Image (cartoon, helix red, strand yellow):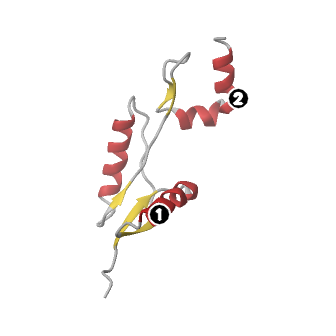
Amino acid sequence: MEKEKETIYFITGNNSKFNEIQKLFQKEDLSYELKQNTINTTEIQASSIKEVAIFKLNSVRGKMNCSFFIEDAGFFVDTPLNGFPGVYSKYVLNTIGNKGILNLIKDFS
């Protein structure tokens, strides 16, 4: 008799992210059943990915009584922007967009 897989939740509203991770779970034949949970998380603007991720993790921890994980990332342009937009990538994308970021880089050429 096959052992039932433990369920683990990926907390994300981004279906593309979920599908990407789900493919990895299937490829690796992990002993977990991955499910998506789109619970609203509290996101803060902070100076480090670690601070943002820990805050998000703690905002979910009180709402879920099961195994779960989160993912957070930033977009860091080393030269010439010294790591900008970093943890503010979502805000920057929503305000000046990709073209705006490329224009910032172009201005340093």
* Residue nearer the viewer, 26 or 82: 26
Task: Residue 2: give x, y in percent of width and height.
Answer: 33, 84
| Placement of the N terminus among the 4 image quadrants | bottom left
* Place of residue 60 in the rendered image (x, y in percent of width and height, measured from the top left): 35, 55
Which is closer to the viewer, label 2 or label 1? 1
Sequence-wise first label, 2 or 1: 1
Q: Quadrant of residue 7?
A: bottom left
Identify the element where label 1 is drawn: helix
Q: Residue furthest bottom?
A: 1
Q: Secondary structure at mark 2?
A: helix
Please state which amino acid type lies under the numbered disc 1.
Lys
Circle 1 packing at 10 Å, graded few (<14), some (14-19), many (20+), is few
Q: Residue at x 55, y 38 (%)?
A: 90
Q: Residue at x 63, y 11 (%)?
A: 108
Residue sitting at x 34%, y 37%: 50
Estimate how packed mark 2 is, as few (under 14), some (14 to 19) or many (20 or more) residues with alpha carbons within 10 Å: few
Quadrant of the rendered image containing residue 62 = bottom left
Residue at the disc numbered 2: 99
Residue 98 higher or lower than 4, as above or below: above
Q: Is residue 42 above or below residue 90?
A: below
Image: 42 above or below 21: above
Indicate the amino acid at tag 2.
Lys
* Residue bearing mark 1: 27
Is residue 101 placed above or below 56 in the rendered structure? above
Q: Would residue 14 be visible to someone looking at this image? A: yes
Circle count: 2
- How far separated are the C-alphas under marks 2 and 1? 36 Å
Disc 2 to disc 1: CB gap under 8 Å: no
Q: Residue at x 30, y 50 (%)?
A: 58
Q: Is residue 37 visible?
A: no
